[in-house]
Structure formats: structure tokens, C-alpha cells
Image (cartoon, rainbow, N blue to C red):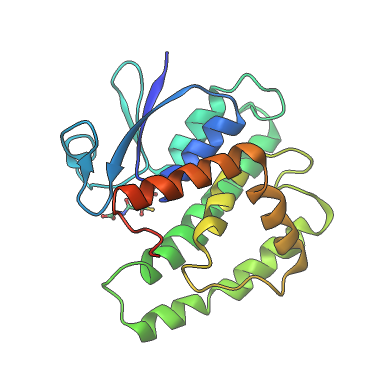
Amino acid sequence: MTATLYHAPLTCSLAARIAAAEGNVPLNIEYLNLRTKELENGGSLYDVNPLGQVSTLKLDNNEIITETSTTILWLQSQSKDPNFHISPSSPEFYQMARWVAFCATELHKQIFRVVFYPEATDEVKDRVRDLAPLRFEVLNKHLSDKPYLLGDHFTAADAYLTWFFVLSKNAQLDPSTYEHLVAYQERTLNRPLIRELIESDRAKDKAMNQQIIPE
Ligand SMILES: N[C@@H](CCC(=O)N[C@@H](CS)C(=O)NCC(=O)O)C(=O)O
């Protein structure tokens, strides 16, 4: 009953990995290099996802789930931790889905998808970076009276937002004037399981010469 995550170190599939770790959901990891699309154990990411993208998850019945947002929601559905698992019939589920979608569309695709890719000029990248402050403001206000996006407990939505902060410095984004966001970043990035995953991904990124975070 263990799903396999096709995982390129430090990329958005780390968000799915964080969700699995925090929800105590068993997960097999198939490493790949996102620059070459080569799977560590042979074959190509294109064999499982024609777009050559992570996050891609293979369930134990061989069904494939793509899109980071959906993989994160699936992983949370498998968690037996009552503080992590949120039933789709509860109103809270839609708050979680809202923040997962916010991370996917307002932060990941809208900002990272431009600043980390060669298609855009430096001028376009800077203009897209200018979208960040309003989004940071929304998050800062939301987090002003709670430690995590949904309240007292780390949920799947936090897994996605935490990953965003793993790479935000490399994207030349600066949330340092948003005090609740800074506190959130410190709180989440220092959770022991998350720290361990980031350290292990940094080492793997380097060993693979994938250079998501260049030295
Ligand atoms: N539609 C996918 C896209 C995710 C995405 O942009 N993944 C990046 C890594 S963070 C990727 O695989 N990039 C490689 C490519 O687009 O060729 C999702 O929402 O998860």
C-alpha cells in the first residue's frame, strides 16, 4: 500500500515529501534529475508524465497522479494522524484546498515558473517578482493570529508553502519585512522532519549535479 513519488531534490515534489513525512504516510522515493529527466533507477520521467514534470505520484495500483496540489491532497487523505488528516466533508477541507491552490497558482506557477526558467527576460522576471509583496501581505495578515495556515496544526497546505520558502531566497524574493511570515518561515523550516528532508535534498541535489540551488 505504498505509493511512489518521483522526486527531483528541492523541487516542488519536496512539498509532497514534506506532506508525507508530516502526515506519517509511507512513501517510496524514486529520485530523478529534473535537468535531464533521468530516473536514478533507469528510464525517464517522460515515461510516467508526458510533461516531464514533478510532482508525479504512482499509487500501488499503478495509477498516476500528477500536479503537486493533487499529490499533496492525496497524501494527506492517507494520513492517520487526526491533526493532519482533514475529511473532505469538513469545512476545514476547503480552507486547506484554498491555501494549496493559492500556493500552486499565486506563488509556484505565477512567480517561480517565471523566475526560475529561461523563457523570460530579466526585466520580465523583475516584474513578476513585483507580484510577491501583495501575496506576502495576504499571507502575513492571515498568519498574524495563528502559527499555521489552518490554525494550530501543520497541514498539507503548510507543506506547499514551506517548500516555497525553501527556494524563495534563490528566487530573489524577500519576505523579511513581513513579521508573521518570517516567524512562520522559521517555525516551519525548523520542524525536525522538514529540516532533515531539506538537508538530505541539498546533498542529493549536489551529488546529482542537478543544481536547483547552485553553489
Ligand atoms: N503542473 C505541475 C507543474 C509543476 C512544476 O512546475 N514542476 C516543476 C518543478 S518545481 C517541473 O517539473 N519543471 C520541469 C519542467 O517544467 O520541465 C504542478 O502543478 O505540479
Q: What residue appears at the point 55 percent right and 36 percent down from the top-left corner? A: 19
Q: Is residue 196 above or below residue 161?
A: above
Q: Is residue 14 above or below residue 29?
A: below
Q: What residue appears at the point 53 percent right and 31 percent down from the top-left corner? A: 20
Q: Is residue 184 above or below residue 127?
A: above
Q: Quadrant of residue 175?
A: bottom right
Q: What residue appears at the point 77 percent right and 67 percent down from the top-left corner? A: 179
Q: Quadrant of residue 83?
A: top right
Q: Residue furthest bottom?
A: 123
Q: What residue appears at the point 37 percent right and 58 percent down from the top-left corner? A: 212
Residue 2, percent from left and from top? 42, 18
Residue 55, percent from left and from top? 37, 42
Residue 192, percent from left and from top? 65, 39
Q: Nearer the viewer, residue 150 or 125?
A: 125
Question: Can residue 12 be seen by looking at this rendering?
Answer: no
Residue 116, percent from left and from top? 37, 67
Which quarter of the rendered picture does the C terminus lie within? bottom left
Q: Nearer the viewer, residue 137 or 174?
A: 174
Question: Can residue 181 be seen by looking at this rendering?
Answer: yes
Instruction: Using residue 138 as the reference point, say whether residue 172 is left or right of it.
Output: left
